């Protein structure tokens, strides 16, 4: 195994929304890109079931909790399959393999002397399923969930997070790209520099969750057991050999992943992940999406209307990774028509229609499949652009590099008026270059738009050194407003 990337595991109290889809599609594109480099990739995602939110949602649905989680886990798996997500593992936190790993890591942290019992009184946010500081509140409310936290006092096990402040800061100094983008890393560092407090690591016994070893009256905090899923996927020994290279997360859970999780691993004597990549939020017309406002966007509905690859393209191209992004129907339609229908789709249709009428037997450069120098330079620049941008999590810029090649091809067709070239050999050579450019574009698109890449590749076949073209149906039929 050469590369290991993860998404967060998502709560099963609701169906996937566009924010979940964005994080997961980003991870999928990176996983596919690494695989295209010849690497063996593990890509995990899954669901977090040991939550009070799960209990509340099951009761609301009038279902037994386990039956509810089974049903919802299937919904999430099906959603990712429909969105072209090629994960190699789907983990549920109710699986026995996860329970065993959680108990093992709890035991390691306990053996390190980093757990103790105590009484905690503080502000508990149901949305976060965690205690939050008064200084985090805005007008007395959790700024993310817009709800007032409860004052809770109870006996818990505590994790000595305060012991890891200096260790974390030293680690950050030695790994200056541990969190990307850089502005998120600065936020993490500033938070740790302000001082860390010990944190509750368990709750008083609930009807659902993983019991604390040797203390059935306490349940391990949902986020504490959820973070361990990344180790569960590999197993303790597998994680020791190769921890996650990238945790792709939303910015709302960055502190858990960049502060608490590394401290837990340090305590447990396990290696830390290579990098935490944090994306921003997606708003709907500039307004944060929420259940109460009823303005959530269902990614499966969008995929049904525009196509899976069109949705993937919009999210990856429109939203600068690490920053907040905005969805509107108008933005989606403009991107679709301008970039896909009139851009890639039109270019592919023109080239394949012209090439379909030609024979490429005996065209110079045909036997080794190398286009002319002009096309070779464009293809090389596109590949450099994609690889360089993907390595920096600039997925939108990587797609822009591909669209530069599409634009070049369009200009070439128009300026050369390929359809008017009278000399047969010259016309076939020009078309060969365009076909090979289109093939290279299809290959570069594979991590981002896998179905579109396959359709273009299937339109070009080779038999005994001769290219044959079979034009497909329109890749992206134009959508009227």
Image: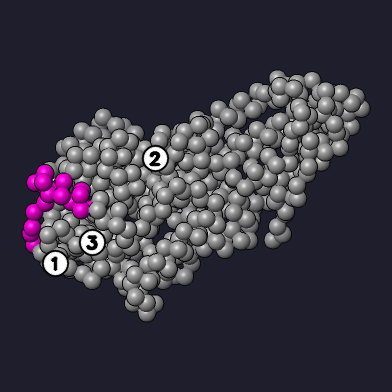
For the residue labelled by badge 2, is the local secondary structure a helix, a strand or a loop? Answer: strand
Q: Is residue 72 located in the magenta-colored stretch of the structure?
A: no
For the residue labelled by badge 3, is the local secondary structure a helix, a strand or a loop? Answer: loop
Please name the residue that numbered disc 2 is placed on: 4
The answer to whether residue 341 is above or below residue 55 is above
Q: Residue at x 85, y 33 (%)?
A: 358
**Relative image position of residue 75 (x, y in whole percent):** 47, 64
Please name the residue that numbered disc 3 is placed on: 210
**Quarter of the C terminus within the rendering:** bottom right
Instruction: Please tell me which residue lies in front, 32 or 240.
Output: 240
Instruction: Answer with left or right where residue 387 lies relative to residue 462.
Output: left
Please name the residue that numbered disc 1 is placed on: 217
The answer to whether residue 466 is above or below residue 84 is above
Question: Residue 366's quadrant in the figure?
Answer: top right
Badge 1 or badge 2: first in the primary sequence: 2
| Distance CA(mark 3)–CA(mark 2) | 26 Å
- Mark 2 crowd level (few <14, some 14–19, many ≥20, 10 Å Cα): many
Q: Is residue 112 located in the magenta-colored stretch of the structure?
A: yes
Q: Are marks 3 and 2 in contact (CB under 8 Å)?
A: no
**Quarter of the N terminus within the rendering:** top left
Q: What range of the chain is rendered magenta?
A: 102-120
| Distance CA(mark 1)–CA(mark 3) | 11 Å
Badge 3 or badge 2: first in the primary sequence: 2
Instruction: Please tell me which residue lies in front, 38 or 285.
Output: 38
**Relative image position of residue 341 (x, y in whole percent):** 70, 49
């Amino acid at each position: 195994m050469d590369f290991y990337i993860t998404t967060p595991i998502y709560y099963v109290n609701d169906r996937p929304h566009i924010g979940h889809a964005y994080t997961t599609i980003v991870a999928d594109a990176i996983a596919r890109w690494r695989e295209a480099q010849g690497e063996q990739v593990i890509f995990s995602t899954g669901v977090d079931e040991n939550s009070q939110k799960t209990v509340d949602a099951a009761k609301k649905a009038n279902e037994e909790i386990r039956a509810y989680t089974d049903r919802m886990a299937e919904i999430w798996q099906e959603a990712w399959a429909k969105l072209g997500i090629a994960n190699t593992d789907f983990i549920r936190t109710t699986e026995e393999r996860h329970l065993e790993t959680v108990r093992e890591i709890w035991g390691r942290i306990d053996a390190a002397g980093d757990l103790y019992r105590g009484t905690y009184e503080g502000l508990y946010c149901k949305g976060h399923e965690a205690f939050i500081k008064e200084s985090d509140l805005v007008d007395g409310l959790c700024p993310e969930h817009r709800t007032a936290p409860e004052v809770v006092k109870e006996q818990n096990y505590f994790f000595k997070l305060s012991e890891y402040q200096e260790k974390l800061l030293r680690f950050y100094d030695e790994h200056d790209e541990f969190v990307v983008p850089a502005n998120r890393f600065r936020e993490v560092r500033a938070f740790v520099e302000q001082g860390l407090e010990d944190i509750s690591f368990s709750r008083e016994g609930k009807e659902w969750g993983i019991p604390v070893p040797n203390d059935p009256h306490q349940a391990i905090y949902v986020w504490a057991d959820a973070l361990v899923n990344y180790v569960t996927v590999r197993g303790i020994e597998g994680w020791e050999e190769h921890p996650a290279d990238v945790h792709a997360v939303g910015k709302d859970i960055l502190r858990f992943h960049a502060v608490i999780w590394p401290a837990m691993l340090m305590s447990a004597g396990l290696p830390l992940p290579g990098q935490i990549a944090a994306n921003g939020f997606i708003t709907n017309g500039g307004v944060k999406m929420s259940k109460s406002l009823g303005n959530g966007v269902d990614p499966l509905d969008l995929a049904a209307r525009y196509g899976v690859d069109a949705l993937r393209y919009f999210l990856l191209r429109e939203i600068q990774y690490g920053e907040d992004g905005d969805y509107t129907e108008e933005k989606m339609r403009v991107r679709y028509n301008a970039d896909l229908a009139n851009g890639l789709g039109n270019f592919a249709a023109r080239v394949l229609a012209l090439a379909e009428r030609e024979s490429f037997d005996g065209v110079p450069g045909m036997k080794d499949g190398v286009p002319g120098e002009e096309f070779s330079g464009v293809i090389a620049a596109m590949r450099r652009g994609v690889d360089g941008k993907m390595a920096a999590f600039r997925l939108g810029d990587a797609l822009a590099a591909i669209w530069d090649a599409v634009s070049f091809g369009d200009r070439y067709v128009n300026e050369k008026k390929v359809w008017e070239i009278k000399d047969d050999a010259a016309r076939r050579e020009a078309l060969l270059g365009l076909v090979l450019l289109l093939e290279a574009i299809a290959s570069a698109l594979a991590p981002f738009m896998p179905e579109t890449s396959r359709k273009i590749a299937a339109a070009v076949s080779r038999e005994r050194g001769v290219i044959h073209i079979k034009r497909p149906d329109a890749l992206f039929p134009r959508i009227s407003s």
